[in-house]
Amino acid sequence: MKRKFFKLVSSLIKQDASDAVLKAPDGWVVEIKQETASMKRKAAMYCLAADISKQLKWDGKVMDEEDWIQLFSAHNKGFGFISALEGDRSKVLLSQSVSGMTTKVANAVMVLIKQFGDSKGVTWSKASAKGFEDYPEANR
C-alpha cells in the first residue's frame, strides 16, 4: 500500500478514507489534521508583505517581507514575548511560521496585511493584485 491523502469534503471521500484505514497494514500511522495553506497562498502572502516592505518602515526601521509576516502573524495569533537566549534584557517576538499556518490562519493574516497596507496607502503590485483575485477572502 502506498501513502494516501484524502481531503475530507464529502461523505463518499470520508468513506474511502475509512476503507483505506481498515485495509492498512498494522503499524501504519493515520493523521487527521486541518489543511495547511497552499504554496500559492503563501506566495501571495509574501507578495503583499514585499509591497509593504518596499514602502513602509516600522518603528523607523526597514523590514524585509519575512519580518513583516512575522509581525502580522504575531498580531493575528496574539502577541507574545520571551527573553532572548542570551539572558540579557532583549526580547523575542513569538509568532507562527508560515509553513505551519492553516488555510484559515493564512487567510486571516492576508486580510490583516491588506487592511494594514490599505490604511497606510500602500500601492499594491500586479503580483499582489493577482493574489487578491486568487484569494478574494483577502480582499475585504
Image (cartoon, rainbow, N blue to C red):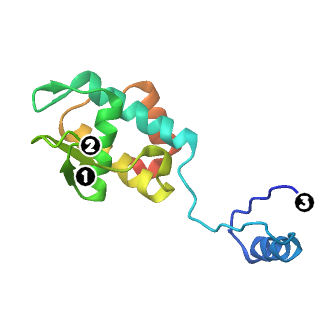
Left or right, 8 with respect to 133, comes to right
User: 67 or 86: nearer the eye?
Assistant: 86
Quick one: label 2 or label 3, which is nearer the N terminus?
A: 3
Indicate left or right for 68 with 37 as reference. Answer: left
Q: Position of residue 109 (x, y in %)?
A: 36, 49
Above or below, 75 against 116 in this view is below
| Among the 4 quarters of the image, the one containing residue 35 | bottom right
Which residue was labeled with disc 2?
Answer: 71
* Residue located 44% across and 25% down the image: 126
Give the numbered dot on residue 1.
3
Q: Which residue position holds label 1?
A: 75
Q: Residue at x 35, y 27 (%)?
A: 50
Q: Quadrant of residue 29?
A: bottom right
Q: Nearer the viewer, mark 3 or mark 1?
A: 3
Secondary structure under tag 2 reads helix
Location of the N terminus (image quadrant) = bottom right
Are the residues tagged 1 and 2 within 8 Å (C-beta)? yes
| Labelled pair 3, 1 in contact (Cβ < 8 Å) | no
